Image: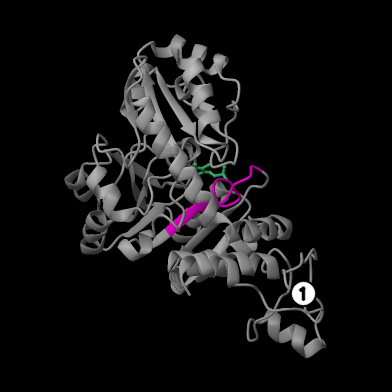
Amino acid sequence: MRPETKAIRIQSDRSNNNEHSVPLYLTSSYVFDDAEDMRSQFAEEREGHIYSRYANPNVEEFIQKMAALEGAENGWATATGMAAVFTFFGAVLSSGDHVVSCRSVFGSTHKLLTEILPKWNIDCNYVDYDDYDGFEAAIHDNTKAVYIETPSNPGLDIIDVRRLSAICKRKNVLLVVDNCFATPLIQQPISLGADVTIHSATKYIDGQGRTLGGVILGTNELIQQVKAFARHTGPALSPFNAWVLSKSLETLDVRLERHCKNAFEVAKRLESHSAISKVKYPFLESHQQYKIAKEQMRYGGGIVTFELKSGLEGGKAFLNRLKLFSLTANLGDVRSIATHPASTTHSKLSPEQRLEVGISNGLVRLSIGLEHLEDIWEDLQQALD
Ligand SMILES: *Cc1c(COP(=O)(O)O)cnc(C)c1O
């Protein structure tokens, strides 16, 4: 089956009711046939469901689909994207280990790497996304993993996964890719040489701004480690959210097609607006890593960023004039969303620190939704004018 079909046709086994669409299994625990069945499942001699912190049919279905789409051997699902990031690090890192990360990563991931993991004597070094020699030089004997986002949030920087994976393989460290902005239907990091992909399923995978969720995908061996950690620390994805996310995967491909078509067109039109100094979109020829983006991505994604000539105040004024776009922190929703990182998510950083992670005062991030292209454009145009 091709990925678009897998996203629809992989389903957990039918129950005795012969349902066509998989029902919701809202149960916190499962019964055993007898005392011996119970003993053998607890002893992990026999696979089965024991408790929904460990396993649930809806969660398993979601994992199975995601693993098939990412080309991974196995996976583990979590309550949020950040739970996936933390669970992965918690499972594979020990005190004294070291992580190398690209400089521009999601805000909470940055907090985790710089303020939370050091509590357990795990340190991190940051490298610019395009400094491949820098990545190589930052990997020390105690480095366990290189962590990247591509495209990055909100910078839309692209890292050549094949090139970086060759460095990681030579140095014997894991390459972990947060694939949230692309989804497996646009880019499959494992097929490009990464060891692990992580998702916030909250974004395009749900796609309608309803639920939080996360997933970690990789080899069986790594996932067994993750499982051993997660069973006893409890970041489990709720069955209801897993059920929503599984259904959402069925429409991911058609949604992405529209998100990306609208976003590409908006990016092209923005490029010629006089209030804007720069537009960034992976599939615009003016993007610095256009060639790499075209090689490793199927579409350019649904996120467009641009810089207003009028800076910090201009950014806020632009947001205030939008009528259709939502001002909200989510992305990958059916509804178009605009954010101004300098006055919100990154306001605590100094202008210099912001520039280090690729955020100028006038930077606006658009998550282009599924509304009619001309309605999206008219709103942007009136606010810009
Ligand atoms: C949103 C996001 C996360 C965190 O996911 P949550 O589901 O909000 O916990 C991680 N990485 C990226 C790139 C994101 O956009």
Location of residue 217 in the rendering, given as x and y in whole percent from the top left corner: 48, 63
Quadrant of the frame with the C terminus: top left
Tell me: 374 left or right of 280. Answer: right
Whether the magenta-drawn stretch holds residue 201 is answered as yes
Query: In the orientation shown, which residue stands out farthest toward the front?
Result: 374
Whether 318 is drawn above or below 368: the answer is above
Location of residue 288 in the rendering, given as x and y in whole percent from the top left corner: 23, 37
Residue pointed to by mark 1: 19
Whether the magenta-drawn stretch holds residue 72 is answered as no
Q: Nearer the viewer, residue 124 or 190?
A: 190
Q: Nearer the viewer, residue 265 or 149?
A: 265
Query: In the orientation shown, which residue stands out farthest toward the left?
Result: 133
Q: Nearer the viewer, residue 188 or 284?
A: 284
**Picture residue at 72% right of the left edge, 66% below the top:** 52
Say which amino acid is labelled 1.
Answer: Glu
Main secondary-structure element of the magenta-colored stretch: loop
Tell me: 177 left or right of 90. Answer: left
Colour convention: one colour
Asked if the beta carbon under badge 1 is closer than 8 A to the nearest atom of ligand 1, the reply is no
Location of residue 344 in the rendering, given as x and y in whole percent from the top left corner: 52, 22
In magenta, the rendered stretch is 197-209
Location of residue 227 in the rendering, given as x and y in whole percent from the top left corner: 56, 67
**Picture residue at 38% right of the left edge, 32% below the top:** 267
- Residue 235 seen in render: yes
Question: Label 1's element?
Answer: loop
Whether 320 is drawn above or below 183: the answer is above
**Picture residue at 35% right of the left edge, 23% below the top:** 353
**Dot 1, how many residues are within 10 Å of its Cα: few (below 14), some (14-19), or many (20+)?**
few
